[in-house]
Image: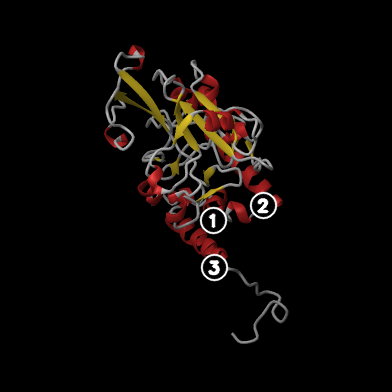
Amino acid sequence: MPGRDEKNNPGFRLIDRRGFLKGAALGLMSMALPHRSDASFWEGFFQKHFREMNSEEIREVIKRLEKEYKEKYKVDFNIKTTKPLPGVLFGYGLDISRCIGCRRCVYACVKENNQSRDPQIHWITVLRFRKGEKWVSNLEEADKYYYPDRVPEEGYFYVPVQCQQCENPPCVKVCPTQATWKERDGIVVIDYNWCIGCRYCMAACPYGARRFNWGEPRIRREEINPNVHYLGNRPRYRGVVEKCTFCIQRTREGRYPACVEICPVGARKFGNLLDPKSEIRYCIEKKRVFRLKEDLNTFPKFYYFFAI
């Protein structure tokens, strides 16, 4: 109605499109799906984009999530929102000549990052190749189902693959809701409350690094890691995509990723690419490094090399 505004009509309040949709959904769902009409669920469904929230809004979201996880898992969670450290761009190195294919990195990652045990989800995949065969362009056909209790095997070598934390990530470009983006420290993150499960990012990723939750993720109470980051290892939902985040909950506090810490042969290296004295810079400058599928111009911050 012309001239109708808050000043002339105290009972009238302008709302944006998100607010309108939220109100409509709450009303409709309370009638159609009473068991899913609780305010907490729909607050999460319609919450603002994480990068648009102010400090107070972030605190409210964290408070709601901690309550939600407490009710679901019977564990007190500590959800961090630690921001990128100034002057830091994370990089990763992996010495293929040292890797023995033991998969301890896989299991340490699962434990640290609250990955579903049933159905089983792994962020790291260790591939096995015969020595002498052409493998860099043949990742999709590699053997990933070997027996880890028999390693290292004569005549084979192993190549772990996970999110490459691309500087030019194709997964970010295709996301229709901007649920995934690259942070200032180079980590490509996902907001599980904004992911709609379209899986465009999975199709766009040339490294097969993203995982989709087809079922409700399940973790036993005694296996849960309650020290989490909003953009990292907090529990996920059915119907969302997840992936490696360089253990954002650890690395932004000056610690190594779980996979680096657990490696029994020291094959994994990690550090600040902007620090000329860091271990990762030493590897890049002193070793013959390469990156997977460099011709795609994704510019991964994950470097592979041979020590010999």
C-beta proximity under 8 Å, tags 3 and 2: no
Mark 2: give few (<14), some (14-19) or many (20+) Cα within 10 Å.
some
Q: Which residue does the image show at 31% across and 38% down from the upper left?
A: 137
Q: Which residue does the image show at 43% across and 45% down from the upper left?
A: 240
The reply to whether residue 23 is visible in this rendering is yes
Q: Which residue position is annotated with label 2?
A: 57
**What's the amino acid at mark 1?**
Phe
Say what secondary structure mark 1 lies in. loop
Find the distance from the CA under tag 3 to the CA under tag 2.
Answer: 19 Å
**What's the amino acid at mark 3?**
Arg
Residue 14 drawn at (x, y percent): 63, 72
Q: Which residue position is annotated with label 3?
A: 17
- Considering only vertical position in the picture, is 30 above or below 5? above
Say what secondary structure mark 3 lies in. helix
- Considering only vertical position in the picture, is 307 above or below 48? above
Tell me which label, 1 or 3, sits earlier in the chain: 3
**What's the amino acid at mark 2?**
Glu
| Nearer to me, 165 or 7 | 165
Q: Which residue does the image show at 34% across and 34% down from the upper left?
A: 136
Say what secondary structure mark 2 lies in. helix
Mark 1: give few (<14), some (14-19) or many (20+) Cα within 10 Å.
some
Residue 256 drawn at (x, y percent): 59, 27
Residue found at the far right of this picture: 7
Mark 3: give few (<14), some (14-19) or many (20+) Cα within 10 Å.
few
Q: Which residue position is annotated with label 1?
A: 46
| Nearer to me, 102 or 113 | 102
Quadrant in the picture for the N terminus: bottom right
Residue 190 drawn at (x, y percent): 51, 45
